[in-house]
Amino acid sequence: MRAIDVIAAKRDREEVAPDALREFVLGYARDEVADYQMAAFLMAGYLNGFSRAEAVALTDAMLASGERLDLARLSGPTVDKHSTGGVGDGTTLVVAPLAAELGMQVVKLSGRGLGHTGGTLDKLDAIPGMRTELSREELVAQVERIGLAVCAQTADLVPADKAMYALRDVTATVDDIALIASSVMSKKLAGGADAILLDVKVGSGAFMKEPARARELAELCVALGEDGGKATAALITDMSQPLAVAVGNATEVREAIEVLRGERSGRFADLCVALAGHMAALCGVAADPREGGERARRALAGGAALERFGRFVEAQGGDRRIVEDLTLLPQAPVVHHVRAGRDAVLASVDAEAIGRAAARVGAGRRRKEEAIDLAVGVDVDVRIGDAVGADTVVARVLAGDEDAARAAGQAVLDALTWSDGPVEPPPLVHAVIGL
Ligand code: URA
């Protein structure tokens, strides 16, 4: 195989044979194929599309580029969940202890935020003392002991995806269905869990803005998971507005703990329950998602999930007292209130712009190497369909200084569109694939 022939085939809209694709990707992981060749291939594929067979071959090749986690020592059932990325999407913090409480073993390899989307590892960093770099032995022992671990993917799992994702990020080739599906599913298959639940986001804050494309992505991910011998399902869920009120790091941890304490209801809590319920059905520890969801609600209301979260924090070196005392989380020096300035009903939200506003105030990064401020972010208090008055506080910007707070506040207001008449809230779960 010559790299140039693979690139030329993609340029000319030919299907690349699985063996050639595998050699090309493995060659890239070994530094035998250059960045500029992979970049040309990615752009040709982005423009001309990849076939289902090519998506399978890309997934297999990325998986073959590294090690796989061996979870055979765990009593199981083991489960992983993955969100395709959104704004105010801290579901892992609630769903992982909930799923553990329902009798599953959660092996969750997470990432850092980039651009307008947040990352679970950054959120966990907001908990004083918390470690997210675990060795394989630590990971497996912790999951057997307390039912869950959430940690960084080690460098030896799917190195080809790591390199290709970094290249896609700077060559405008991220939001292709086959590239996203093969990237996500190679990591999930390498993670070794028996069951995989995907949360495919759709809407203004998601990679997939259109429901039809989100469905295509969900169906491809489920097919790749099942090809890989895993029980796989996907929920297509709303990202036409931030999922939780909080968008940031410490602020998302605070809200997740409030949900675990049973103090907060709403769309974020509802989605956490739905995800845990579907995981339970997928793993066979509940008869169906509904029964799983009911048990999840009881685990929240009775304090069992909060207790499990506390054990998880302690196991990874974090300060367990945050469960009772939220002031131990980093606090922003400035809290700036943003008022609606009109009597109206919230019609739509540019969720990506809200994510960017939070990133600009310091909660996210534009480039991988940038540091983030764990204390800052944006809390958006209104949801599509809510009626407000001119004085209603629609958001609170948590910032390091007044100027940054005011600029982010204006960006949040600019991201909101208003109506004079009633507006129907969007559904939380659009569809379920594979269950
Ligand atoms: N998340 C991933 O892991 N990979 C992608 O390509 C997009 C989102």
Image (cartoon, rainbow, N blue to C red):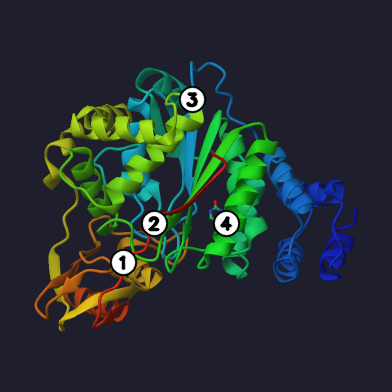
User: On screen, 293 above or below 32?
Assistant: above
Q: CA distance from mark 3 to mark 1?
A: 39 Å
Image quadrant, ligand 1 = bottom right
**Crowd class of label 2 (few under 14; some 14 to 19; many from 20; radius 10 Å):** many
**Crowd class of label 4 (few under 14; some 14 to 19; many from 20; radius 10 Å):** many
Q: Is residue 132 visible?
A: no
Q: Is residue 364 left or right of residue 220?
A: left
User: On screen, 335 above or below 131?
Assistant: below
Q: Earlier in the sequence, mark 1 or mark 4?
A: 4
Query: Residue visible at 57% across and 63% down?
Result: 212
Q: Amino acid at mark 1?
A: Ala
Residue 129 location (% of width, % of height): 27, 38
Are the residues flagged by discs 2 and 1 in contact, CB closer than 8 Å? Answer: yes
Q: In front: 109, or 138?
A: 109
Q: Earlier in the sequence, mark 2 or mark 4?
A: 2
Task: In the displayed orientation, state which residue is furthest to the left.
Answer: 391
**Crowd class of label 1 (few under 14; some 14 to 19; many from 20; radius 10 Å):** many
Front position among marks 2 and 4: 4
Q: Amino acid at mark 2?
A: Gly
As drawn, the label of residue 218 is none
Q: Earlier in the sequence, mark 4 or mark 3?
A: 4
Q: Amino acid at mark 3?
A: Gly
Residue 257 location (% of width, % of height): 21, 42
Residue 390 location (% of width, % of height): 11, 81
Query: Residue visible at 27% across and 26% down?
Result: 311
| Secondary structure beneath label 4 | helix
Front position among marks 3 and 1: 3
Q: Which residue is mark 2?
A: 118
Q: Which residue is mark 1?
A: 358
Q: Amino acid at mark 4?
A: Arg
